[in-house]
Image (spheres, rainbow, N blue to C red):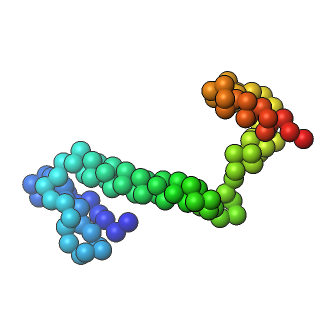
Amino acid sequence: MGHQIIKQPNGKYAVFSSIVDNFIILDATKQDIIEYYVKEQTHEITMRTNNIIERLEKGEKPYYQFTKTWTMALDWIKQVHGEDAIKVLERELSHTDTDKVNHVACKD
């Protein structure tokens, strides 16, 4: 990120961007700057999550060859953590989903 937080002579803060070679925030408090970056990151996270879910809905693989299906994830959990981990999932999911977990996790 091409930003620097700089303390102004009046004791407040500014944010200098090397992308636009100018200040993008002036006379800010620490909380103002935190809120700015939280808002920026919230936007990035929202965009990234929307993109992943849209691709999943289209049947695409947003993680390329590393994209797991529900079955693959359950098999991996069982392999790494054992059958008890699947039982924990069963307790956490609704009855309908639990049936799906039992069916998938117990297959040979």
| Residue 63 seen | no
Can residue 69 be seen in the rendering of this structure? yes
Give how far across and how far down residue 55 sits, in percent: 55, 60
> Does 11 appear above or below 2?
above
Considering every residue shown, the one lying at the far left of the view is 10
User: In screen coordinates, is 92 left or right of 102?
Assistant: left
Q: Quadrant of residue 76?
A: top right
Residue shown at 62%/27% (left/top)? 94
Most foreground residue, 69 or 32 = 69
Relative image position of residue 107 (x, y in whole percent):
86, 39
What's the residue at 31%, 65% (across, down)?
Answer: 3
Relative side of 79 to 20, left or right: right
Quadrant of the image containing the C terminus: top right
Q: For the point 38% across and 66% down, which residue is it?
A: 1
Is residue 70 found left or right of 62 in the rendered image?
right
Q: Is residue 83 left or right of residue 4?
A: right
Q: Position of residue 35 (x, y in %)?
A: 27, 47
- The picture places residue 23, in percent across and down from the top left corner, at 19, 67
